[in-house]
Image (cartoon, coloured by chain):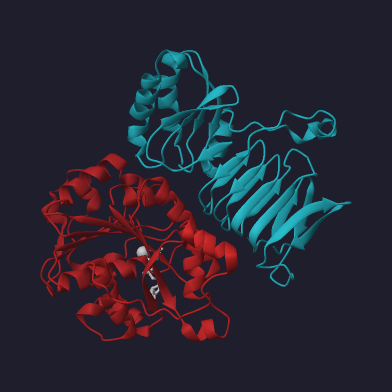
Chain colours: A cyan, B red
């Protein structure tokens, strides 16, 4: 299980055989390099030559800062970055354009194999916050969001997605092609949900609008049922 | 002197940032505080007109950061009320004329000499907005009760939060109760539920705003009107006074999950 909070301190955590450096959202861009440097210094010898995930949470990271981080903190320690992680959609696009790995997921073309070769189960991502417009989460595994997904925010998971609050943005469960997964929303008010390669559209006239719902793929379509406990 | 630097921003254009900056600045000055209203909308300056100070501009913000003049020379003093100043934008330049370092330098020069610095941000999420918000201790996000405006405000709040700003208040502008009653406009509760930040005031749609903008006379210096009252209330709340928000009461929550979310303060 990965627990994410928005504390104001850089922390190192283990994640699937490598180290994840969680960078706080608070400090201004100018303070990032010294902060990362200090955290890696504190960690000592174990990080030398290690493979790490750099997790910037919701903060946008300008290209210049990326370069500075590489030059001043990563290269001197011979670190390999497996993933540059941020929820900021624009930064993700920028990182991808620069050829940096942002998020590992099987490309859709591999879908044919996905049913036969089961990947080892990944830990669920538990996000204790709401996602605002323009923020995006991608995760290889299940995602639980203890918060809202606002309009204009996006969630992509290779597994199931469970949103305790309002779902107004986009959720794409099974985004590598797995259609045995589900989407649960505490308060459903969104126009579109995707599971695997299926898409369904809704509007405020839908009987489940504003309700707590579960969505799964049955046959060749996504079916929605209202949850009552 | 402890200076509060407040950025007024919105994401979406034309929702009332300049109107809010001008009126709150005048209101604060009228209550005896020293205030500078900074027009950070470089290239599209408006604040000078809304404040009625356009005829007296000599230098502007870009001149200051480029050392073409001293800060004191660029500040335009309002003659109608003590301690109210405008730092105008340059009309002939673009947002790129100011770098983050220059903006930081400017804010540091203002800090300590005034009670309040209100920065009128340009629309958008690019460098102009970033510069305007850079040194602000607090943010006032302006939104109208429309889906597109609320979504843009949400985007802006996300960016402000990611920059570590934790004092973010919302002003709902151009509110029309009649339209809400007819189901044609978002209710204030709807807006607050989506944005999950504190609402510091609701300004009604009011012709007096247009009249005062065109006359260049902020409401607190002239007309009495519902909007003038709203700006006075917001000023009082900014100053920490407990002025109850007269929100139209709507449905409070949505069952178990809403309750849980409130408990978790999400
Ligand atoms: N409460 C109100 N009632 C009526 N008219 C209003 C109100 N608030 C703003 N307006 C009008 O809306 C228009 C836009 O306002 P303003 O210039 O303050 O917006 P802005 O957010 O600064 O725009 P920009 O993004 O272009 O800088 C103006 O003509 C103004 O007079
Ligand atoms: Mg303006």
At 38% from the left and 35% from the top, the residue drawn is A9
Q: Quadrant of ligand 1?
A: bottom left
Foreground residue among B193 and A100 = B193
Q: Position of residue B148 (x, y in %)?
A: 54, 65
Q: Position of residue B211 (x, y in %)?
A: 32, 82
Q: Is residue B265 left or right of residue A93?
A: left
Above or below: residue A227 compared with residue B210: above
Where, by quadrant of the figure, is residue B13 drawn? Answer: bottom left
Above or below: residue A165 compared with residue A137: below
Count of labels in the image: 0
Where, by quadrant of the figure, is residue A74 drawn? Answer: top left
Name of the residue lying farthest toward the right: A219
- Quadrant that contains the C terminus of chain A: bottom right
- Quadrant that contains the N terminus of chain A: top right
Foreground residue among A28 and A65 = A28
Name of the residue lying farthest toward the front: A229
Does the image show residue B145? no
Foreground residue among A73 and A141 = A141
Where, by quadrant of the figure, is residue B210 drawn? Answer: bottom left
Q: Is residue B1 left or right of residue A84?
A: left
Q: Position of residue A55 (x, y in %)?
A: 50, 34
Q: Position of residue A27 (x, y in %)?
A: 35, 39
Does the image show residue A87? yes
At 13% from the left and 64% from the top, the residue drawn is B34
């Amino acid at each position: 299980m990965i627990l994410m909070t928005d504390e104001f301190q850089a922390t190192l955590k283990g994640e699937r055989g490598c180290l994840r450096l969680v960078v706080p959202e608070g400090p201004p861009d100018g303070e990032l390099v010294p902060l990362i440097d200090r955290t890696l210094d504190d960690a000592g010898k174990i990080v030398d030559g290690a493979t790490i995930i750099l997790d910037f949470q919701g903060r946008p990271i300008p290209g210049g800062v990326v370069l500075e981080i590489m030059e001043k903190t990563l290269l001197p320690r011979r670190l390999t970055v497996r993933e540059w992680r941020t929820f900021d959609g624009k930064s993700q696009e920028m990182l991808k354009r620069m050829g940096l790995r942002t998020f590992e997921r099987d490309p859709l073309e591999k879908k044919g194999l996905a049913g036969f070769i089961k990947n080892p189960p990944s830990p669920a991502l538990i996000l204790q916050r709401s996602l605002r417009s323009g923020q995006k989460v991608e995760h290889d595994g299940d995602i639980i969001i203890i918060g809202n997904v606002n309009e204009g925010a996006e969630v992509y998971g290779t597994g199931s997605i469970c949103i305790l609050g309002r779902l107004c943005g986009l959720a794409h469960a099974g985004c590598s092609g797995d259609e045995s997964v589900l989407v649960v929303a505490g308060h459903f008010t969104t126009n579109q949900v995707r599971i695997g390669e299926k898409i369904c559209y809704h509007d405020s006239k839908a009987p489940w609008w504003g309700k707590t719902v579960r969505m799964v793929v049955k046959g060749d379509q996504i079916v929605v049922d209202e949850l009552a406990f | 002197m402890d200076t509060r630097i407040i950025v007024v921003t919105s994401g979406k254009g034309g929702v009332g940032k300049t109107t809010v900056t001008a009126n709150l600045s005048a209101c604060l000055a009228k209550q005896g505080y020293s205030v500078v209203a900074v027009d950070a909308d470089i290239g599209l300056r408006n604040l000078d007109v809304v404040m009625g100070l356009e005829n007296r501009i000599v230098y502007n913000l870009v001149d200051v950061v480029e050392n073409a003049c001293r800060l004191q020379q660029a500040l335009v003093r309002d003659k109608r009320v003590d301690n109210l100043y405008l730092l105008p934008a340059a009309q002939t330049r673009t947002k790129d004329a100011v770098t983050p370092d220059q903006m930081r330098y400017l804010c540091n020069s203002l800090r300590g000499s005034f009670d309040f610095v209100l920065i009128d941000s340009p629309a958008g999420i690019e460098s102009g907005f970033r510069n305007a918000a850079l040194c602000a201790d607090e943010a006032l996000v302006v939104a109208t009760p429309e889906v597109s405006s609320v979504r843009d405000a949400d985007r802006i709040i996300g960016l402000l939060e990611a920059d570590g700003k934790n004092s973010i208040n919302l002003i709902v502008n151009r509110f029309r109760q009649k339209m809400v009653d007819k189901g044609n406009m978002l209710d204030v509760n709807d807006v607050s539920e989506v944005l999950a930040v504190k609402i510091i005031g609701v300004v009604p749609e009011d012709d007096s705003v247009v009249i005062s903008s065109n006359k260049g006379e902020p409401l607190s210096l002239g007309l009495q009107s519902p909007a003038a009252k709203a700006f006075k209330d917001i000023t009082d709340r900014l100053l920490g006074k407990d002025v109850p928000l007269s929100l139209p009461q709507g449905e409070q929550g949505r069952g178990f999950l809403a309750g849980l979310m409130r408990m978790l303060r999400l």
